[in-house]
Image: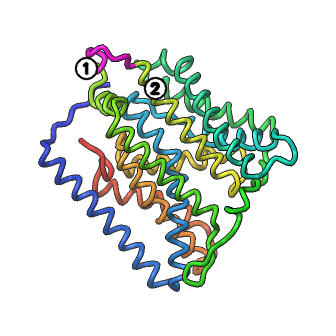
Amino acid sequence: MTTTFDSSPALRTGALRQSLLISALFVVGLLVINLLFFPVGTVAVVLLSGLYQGMLFFLVAAGMSIVFGLLDVLNLAQGSFFMLGAYAGFAIYGALPEGTPTTVRFVAALVGATLAGGLLGGVVEIALLRPLYVRPIFQIVLTLGLATAIEEIVREIYGPAGLIPIEPPAALDTTFGVFGAQFETYRLFIIVVGFLLMVSVSLLLQRTRLGIIIRAGVQDSEMVEALGINVRRVFTLVFVLGTAVAALGGMTAAPFLGAYPTMGTQFLLTAIIVIVIGGMSSYEGTAIASILVGLTRATAEQLSLQYFNTPILASVSALVFMVIVLLVRPTGLFGRE
C-alpha cells in the first residue's frame, strides 16, 4: 500500500491540535450533561461504565485499525475473533480438572484464548488473505463470509442461547463504592487491562523496530520492501497481533457478558463506528474514539433508563456521534487527507 500525505507538517500539527480540542470539549460536554441530570454517584458510575465499554470497543477496533493501515484490509471477521476468544476461554476454563482454583482457571483461559486467537489469525492471513492482497473487494467479501461461517458454526455447536458468564477470581467478583454508588470490580479490571494494552501497543508502535517498520509500512509498504524487509512476515505479525487482542477482549468480557454467537457482530459494528470516528488507520484516533464512544453510550444508556424507558437512545447514540464527527471532519478526528 502506498499512502501520500499532501498536507505540510505544520498543517498536520494544527489538525492534531484541533482534533484533541474537539475530543476534550466533547468529554467536557458529556460531563456537564451527566452533572445536570444525575447525582454525583451516578455520574461516577456512568463515567466508569463508559470507560469499561470503551475498552471493550478498543480491543476489537485496535487490531482492525492497524491491519487496515498496513494491509488495506478491512477485516470484517474481527468481531468473530472476539467471540471465539470468549468461547475458547469457556472451553479452557471448563477443561481444567475439578478443584483447580478459580484464579488459575481464569488466567489459563485468558492466556489460552489469546494464543488461540493469534494462531487462528495467522492461519487466516497466510491461507486466505495473502493471495488476495491485490484484490481489496475480494478481501472484504472473504472476511464477511468468514465471519458469517464462524457465527453459524458456533451456533450449531453451542446453540443460539449462548453460555452464561463464567466465574471470575474471587478478588474481582466484588463491588466497591463510588460517591455512594456501587461499581463492579471486574469492570474496573477490564478498564485496567484495556489501558495497559492501549499503552503497550502504542509503545510497540513507537519505540520498537517492528513498530517503526509497521508505521513505515502504513505510509509506503513498497519502499519498506525495497529496503530488504520481509513485508509479508510483518503483515502476518500485525494480523496475529490484531486477532490476539480481539480474542483477549472476548475472554476478558466472558465473565461479565458470557458468550453468544452474535456478540462478535454486535461489537464489530461499534468497532467500525469507532474506527471511522477516530480516522481510518489511525491507532491513536481509534484509542481516543473508543473512549469517546464508550462514554457516549454509557451516558445515553443512563438517560434512556432514567427518563425515556427505551433503549433506542443508547442504540443510536454512537451512530449519531459518528455522523456529527464526519460533518465536522470528513476524515475522522485523527484521519489524514
Q: Quadrant of residue 311?
A: bottom right
Residue 161, position as x, y percentages in the image: 79, 49
Task: Point out the frontmost of discs 1 and 2.
Answer: 1
Residue 252, position as x, y percentages in the image: 63, 50
Describe residue 281's horizontal placement relative to residue 54 as left or right: left
Residue 182, position as x, y percentages in the image: 63, 76
Q: Residue at position x 56%, y 61% from top? A: 315
Q: Residue at position x 87%, y 45% from top? A: 98
Residue 267 vertical position relative to residue 172 in the rendered view, above or below:
above
Residue 164, position as x, y percentages in the image: 78, 53
Q: Which residues are magenta?
A: 223-231
Residue 138 inside the magenta-drawn segment: no
Residue 202 vertical position relative to residue 211 in the rendered view, above or below:
below
For label 2, count other residues whose C-alpha is less than 10 Å away and answer few (under 14), some (14-19) or many (20+). Answer: few
For label 1, count other residues whose C-alpha is less than 10 Å away and answer few (under 14), some (14-19) or many (20+). Answer: some
- Which residue does the numbered mark 2 point to in the structure image? 137
Front-lying residue, 74 or 224:
224
Question: Count of labels shown?
Answer: 2
- Which residue does the numbered mark 1 point to in the structure image? 223
What is the CA distance from the residue labelled 1 to the residue labelled 2? Answer: 24 Å
Residue 226 inside the magenta-drawn segment: yes
Front-lying residue, 184 or 239:
184
In the image, what residue type sits under mark 1? Met
In the image, what residue type sits under mark 2? Ile
Rendered-image quadrant of the N terminus: top left
Who comes first in sequence, dot 1 or dot 2?
A: 2
- Looking at the rendered structure, the secondary structure element under dot 1 is helix
Describe residue 203's horizontal placement relative to residue 114 as left or right: left
Describe residue 179's horizontal placement relative to residue 282 as left or right: right
- Looking at the rendered structure, the secondary structure element under dot 2 is helix
